Image (cartoon, rainbow, N blue to C red):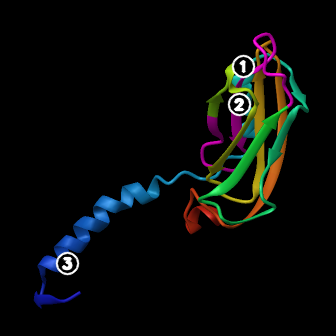
Amino acid sequence: MTQRKGTEASRRDVVAGGIAMAVAPILGAVPGLATPDEMNDELKKVIGQATLKKGRVKVSLPELTENGNSTALAVSVDSPMTAADHVRALHIFAEKNPVPYIARLGIGPKAGKAQIATSIRVADSQKITVVAEMSDGSFWSGQGSTEVTTPACIDDSDRLR
């Protein structure tokens, strides 16, 4: 950056300094990755005192994700989807995303099938846990994992922590 006279700053210096001051707090506020324990804490907020049972939920993720900004996720739940026995909601959790509780998707008996296909952002190689909340109050879970070559949700400085 050039200066016109001894200590006199150019307009370019002032503008660049102003931009740096405005952006610095934002960049410093980028959250780090969650831990599996933090994910479990979020999961417990959803299920409360209920027992989380394994099974009935099939989670499909690609083994390798080139870009974590768009990772394919498919979920299906073994349920008859009748008025008396159906999936109320699917809860999606990521153990290493900055915010581990990714989504809650409401489903009901009129859906016909308990399955979804979507894309999620994945911050790093990790396990994704999906919990099916059933109409009888039970909770069932399944997991899938993916290796991510280009993470999303974070910048390189957070990845190095």
* Residue type for callout 1: Pro
Bin the neighbour count of mark 1 within 10 Å (Cα to Cα): few under 14, some 14-19, many 20 and up.
Answer: some
Q: Secondary structure at mark 2?
A: strand
Q: Quadrant of the C terminus?
A: bottom right
Please say if the residues under marks 2 and 1 sit with CB atoms less than 8 Å apart: no
Span shown in magenta: 78-103
Name above or below for residue 51 compared with residue 3. Answer: above
Which kind of residue does numbered mark 2 sit on?
Leu
- First reached walking from the N terminus: tag 3 or tag 1: 3
Q: What is the CA distance from the residue labelled 3 to the residue labelled 1?
A: 63 Å
Q: Would you name the residue on which mark 2 appears?
A: 90
Marks 3/2: CA–CA distance: 52 Å
Q: Residue at x 75, y 59 (%)?
A: 125
Which is more toward the observer, 113 or 117? 113
How far apart marks 2 and 1 lie (CA) works out to 13 Å
Q: Are marks 3 and 1 in contact (CB under 8 Å)?
A: no
Measuring from the top left, give residue 63's x and y in whole percent.
Answer: 81, 61
Mark before the other along the chain sequence, 2 or 1: 2
Q: Is residue 12 above or below residue 133?
A: below
The nearer-to-camera label among 2 and 1 is 1
- Mark 3 is surrounded, within 10 Å at the Cα level, by few (under 14), some (14 to 19) or many (20 or more) other residues, namely some
